[in-house]
Image (cartoon, rainbow, N blue to C red):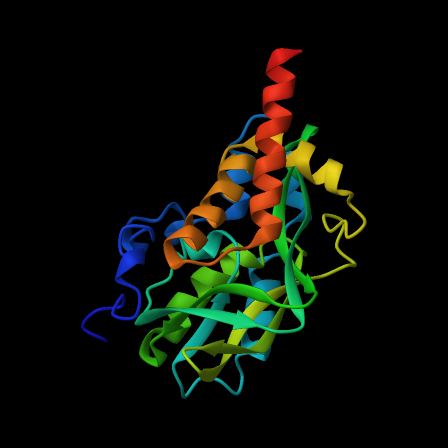
Amino acid sequence: MMSDPFIHHPELRDKITDPSLSFFRDFNAADAFSQQPGLSWVVDMLRTFDQREACRKVTLAEKRNDHLWVFAYGSLMWDPAFDFRQVRRGKIEGFSRRFILKDIYGARGTIDQPGAMAALDTGPGCHGLIFQIDREKLETETEILWRREMAFPCYIPTFVTVTSGGENFEALTFVADHKAGSMHPDLTHDEQVQFLATGKGFLGTSKEYLENIVSHFTALGILDESCVTLLRDVEAFNRSSEAA
């Protein structure tokens, strides 16, 4: 264990939830959705434990002898839930953060008021964070990760090359699965703005999700113009709605 996981980025020390205190540490999607009024129908859409475990074992089959890097581009950036040895700023090429995950399932949006969240899709590049999981804790911590990120059939676990501090790292990340019913790569900018402005569920609002991404990049001195533009347009949408 490194003495200080934030040695590379002390500015993130107060911006990342302590894994031991994270809501997602013991998160079980089936329990979470079944306990929410009107959301029991979502449970039938979730992957089973056996399906998740089979995917996890295949994905990590050749990675069990080393520390594992995980590239985060959305909520994992501020609340990874898994224990990590260190965190670094990083960028990958060939992918972009796109708000094409339409949430009607109750987490940050509903059928009546859909929300939107980020997915990793093809594009010119994507900034984010990489977290390193100790190889001695790989089983426990990646099970937590899979229980959260692979609860729904939304993502494809993929290894990518991340550039950080002039070095290249191989990292696991979760890429948009266009075959999934929740992925809508054809969402227009106006639809994304509306969903981000009005979507809310038991995990919070879609707007808070976007604000957290922008806040992290501000702390790191990164200008992500697409996220800044989206947040600006979301705030304008809300002002216009309040004035109407």
Q: In this view, does 172 lie above or below 204?
A: below
Residue 124 place in picture, x, y as percent: 67, 68
Seen from the viewer's position, the closer of residues 145 and 170 is 170
Left or right of 6, for residue 168? right
* Picture residue at 64% right of the left edge, 19% below the top: 240
Residue at 53% from the left image edge and 30% from the top image edge: 36
Residue 52 in percent (x, y) is at: 58, 64
Choose between 236 and 204: the one closer to the eye.
236
Residue 52 visible:
yes
- Residue sitting at the far top: 244
Q: Quadrant of the C terminus?
A: top right
The answer to whether residue 198 shows anywhere in this view is no
Work out which residue is located at the far right of the displayed protein and give it. Answer: 186
- Check the image and report above or below for 199 versus 210: above
Against 14, residue 170 (above or below) is below
Which quadrant holds residue 207? Answer: top right
Residue drawn at point x = 57 percent, y = 30 percent = 235
The quadrant where residue 243 appears: top right
Give coordinates of residue 20: x percent, y percent. Answer: 28, 54
Residue shown at 60% from the left, 71% from the top: 55
Residue 31 location (% of width, % of height): 50, 42
Which quarter of the figure is the N terminus placed in?
bottom left
Which quarter of the figure has residue 175? Answer: bottom right
